[in-house]
Image (cartoon, helix red, strand yellow):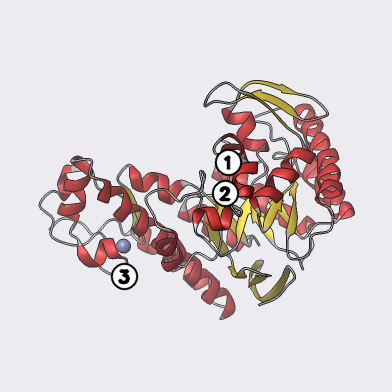
Amino acid sequence: MTERFGFTLKATDGKARTGVIHTPRGEIRTPAFMPVGTAATVKAMLPGSVRETGADILLGNTYHLMLRPGAERIARLGGLHRFMNWERPILTDSGGFQVMSLASLRKLTEEGVRFSSHIDGSKHMLSPERSMEIQKLLGSDIVMCFDECPALPATDEVVAKSMRLSMRWAQRSRDAFGDRPGHALFGIMQGGVTRDLREESAKALVEIGFDGYAVGGLAVGEGQEAMFDVLDYAPGFLPEDKPRYLMGVGKPDDIVGAVERGIDMMDCVLPSRSGRTGQAWTRRGQVNLRNARHQDDPRPLDEDCTCPACRGYSRAYLHHVLRAQEIIASMLLTWHNLHYYQELMQGLRDAIAEGRLAAFVAGFHAQRAGGDIGPL
Ligand SMILES: [Zn+2]
């Protein structure tokens, strides 16, 4: 245990990295996948179960928590960790991305964003200063700068203007965050899919100085190829001795490609959200358990998986509880998907540490190409 936030890079393989982020609430092994606990819960999972899948850190959403139940209320109740019964590290986003995608009647100015709640229409303001205050009230271990993220495709002019606003907000976030030992503030690189803008953004952030750096503004509809093009150069603009976080990514093959390009942390709602709709992610690819071909299948979802859904239940049972809309369907499939994601991260960490990432990635793609376990 440490009282300060820090990052130790342990090994590299090509551009890929493995290491440990140290926080007073425990270590985060990297590359790390962070399950999303939007409303102070990873839906359908108890916190202890999320930990059992191998997660070292969760993500919470500032926008949702400030509206319901309110950041001041969570602070009065002892902070987000105690409130949701998760004692390990929590990263919170700044609310910037979600206010632009979810809130109504938004008004964006130099000061920040005024908006109406999507829940009850109540009026609110988010600014760099208010976002820092909310994330402090929540007790977040890793705090994100307040930024703005334009939807792609957008012209270079729009992307540049937005990025420069985000850089001014990054300075204001840094000033408002102050000195909080044991807590980290991450800057967010913007600049869309334009190399010069990405470089300008990275330089501005490094000049201000942060405990870690996120690559923002990707996974917003540009497609995997365009995202990988940016990741081919963007991580290289960031300091080697600080963690690099790719926000909102992704599918298993996005994660593998991002790790190959030097990313240390990722988050995505995909494994939990798709679990609730009957989509399972396995080493052999995606399986839709709602499909009628599973209704008489006595085999587990993945014969090699050690999660409770695969150890105790057949595909036929998972299909049945999904069709019957039983709550256990969401519980079992979320557990399986999070387990699969964390096992993938462990595989990546081990492969990088042992200098055999290329072989691991080749095996990953070959298994998926082989298809689902096939007919009975
Ligand atoms: Zn499983």
Q: CA distance from mark 2 to mark 3?
A: 27 Å
Left or right side of 369 for 248: right
Q: Are marks 1 and 3 in contact (CB under 8 Å)?
A: no
Q: Quadrant location of residue 88?
A: bottom right
Q: Is residue 220 above or below residue 344?
A: above
Q: Amino acid at mark 3?
A: Thr
Ligand 1 within 8 Å of disc 3? The answer is yes
Residue 15 location in percent, x, y? 67, 66
Residue at the right extreme, as displayed: 207
- In the image shown, does 367 or 300 lie closer to the viewer? 300
Q: Do the numbered discs 1 and 2 sit on residues whose CB atoms are within 8 Å?
A: yes
**In front: 208, or 157?**
208
Whether residue 155 can be seen here: no
**Dot 1: element:** helix
Image coords of residue 161 (percent x, y) = 81, 30
Q: Is residue 22 above or below residue 289?
A: below
- The C terminus lies in which quarter of the figure? bottom left
**Residue 155 got which mark?**
none
Q: Which mark is first along the chain, 3 or 2? A: 2
Q: Work out whether residue 131 or residue 356 is closer to the camera in this orientation and state it.
A: 131
Q: Is residue 49 left or right of residue 178?
A: left
Q: Residue at x 71, y 50 (%)?
A: 136
Q: Residues within 10 Å of mark 1 (few under 14, many from 20)?
A: many
Q: Is residue 324 visible?
A: yes
The residue that mark 3 highlights is: 306
Element at label 2: strand
Q: Residue furthest top?
A: 105
Percent across and percent down for residue 369 are 36, 57
Label placed on residue 60: 2
Q: Of the two numbered discs 1 and 3 on the same chain, state the one appearing first in sequence.
A: 1
Q: Is residue 34 left or right of residue 94?
A: left
Residue 65 tag number: 1
